[in-house]
């Protein structure tokens, strides 16, 4: 029964927000319509609740999700080639680093600072998938083409039994204190509505 189950949530409180019950299984993409801006205290608490090894009442994690983020944010790596950054800073093997770079069609000697914002998001996803078959990601700051590329990348892994949670941040602050959940059908291109 729990073989493909990644997370079972029986409803939890994150700060002032209520997260309703949900089950995340292999091959699923679940979207949280998050009512607060990225980086808010509740945002950090949600990430911690989902990715920490610590158990919370009403939240069972059979797989520890990995949070995708823009890699090397805030690091002083202006002159470090991307392959070297993946190996030394992300602790990824040379073979895995080369596989990631080949998949994204990025040269190994490109400087991290030369990557587009979309390429940084895609790189963050590949790093996350390297560490877990269940990831948490967002598409904040991406244009329509970037969102499309991110969801196409996610769809590739979902059909291979990966699972993901997309945190959809509002463009304006919303005061609703209940997080709305939605299961996204990755067999269609309905991710275009997520902008």
Image (spheres, rainbow, N blue to C red):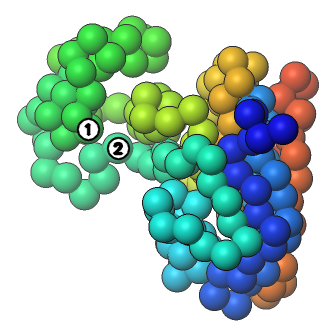
Q: Where in the figure is residue 165, as x and y percent of width and height?
A: 69, 48
Q: Based on the displayed image, in which of its 4 quarters is residue 127 positioned?
A: top left
Q: Is residue 187 visible?
A: yes
Depth check, mark 2 against mark 1: the one in front is 1
Question: Where residue 137 sits: x, y (%)?
Answer: 59, 48
SS state under label 1: loop
- Position of residue 171 relative to residue 92, above or below, is below
Residue under label 1, please give it. 90
28 to the left or right of 43: right
The quarter of the picture where residue 175 lies is bottom right
Residue found at the far front of this picture: 1
Q: Mark 2 packing: few (<14 Cα in 10 Å), some, or many (20+)? A: many
Q: Which sits in the foreground, 61 or 134? A: 61
CB-based contact (under 8 Å), mark 2 and mark 1: yes
Q: Is residue 32 left or right of residue 126?
A: right
Q: Residue at x 77, y 47 (%)?
A: 24
Q: Find disc 2 in the rendering and name its residue.
A: 71
């Amino acid at each position: 029964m729990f073989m493909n189950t990644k997370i079972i949530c029986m409803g939890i409180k994150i700060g002032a927000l209520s997260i309703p019950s949900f089950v995340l299984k292999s091959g699923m993409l679940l979207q949280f319509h998050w009512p607060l801006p990225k980086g808010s205290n509740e945002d950090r608490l949600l990430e911690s609740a989902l990715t920490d090894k610590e158990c919370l009442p009403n939240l069972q994690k059979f797989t520890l999700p990995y949070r995708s983020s823009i890699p090397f944010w805030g690091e002083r790596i202006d002159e470090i080639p991307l392959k070297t950054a993946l190996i030394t800073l992300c602790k990824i093997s040379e073979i895995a680093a080369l596989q990631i770079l080949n998949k994204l069609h990025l040269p190994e000697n490109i400087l991290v600072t030369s990557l587009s914002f979309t390429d940084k998001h895609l790189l963050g996803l590949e790093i996350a998938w390297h560490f877990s078959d269940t990831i948490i990601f967002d598409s904040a700051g991406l244009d329509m083409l970037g969102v499309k590329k991110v969801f196409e990348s996610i769809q590739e892994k979902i059909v291979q039994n990966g699972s993901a949670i997309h945190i959809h941040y509002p463009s304006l602050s919303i005061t609703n204190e209940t997080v709305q959940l939605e299961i996204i059908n990755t067999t269609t291109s309905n991710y275009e509505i997520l902008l």
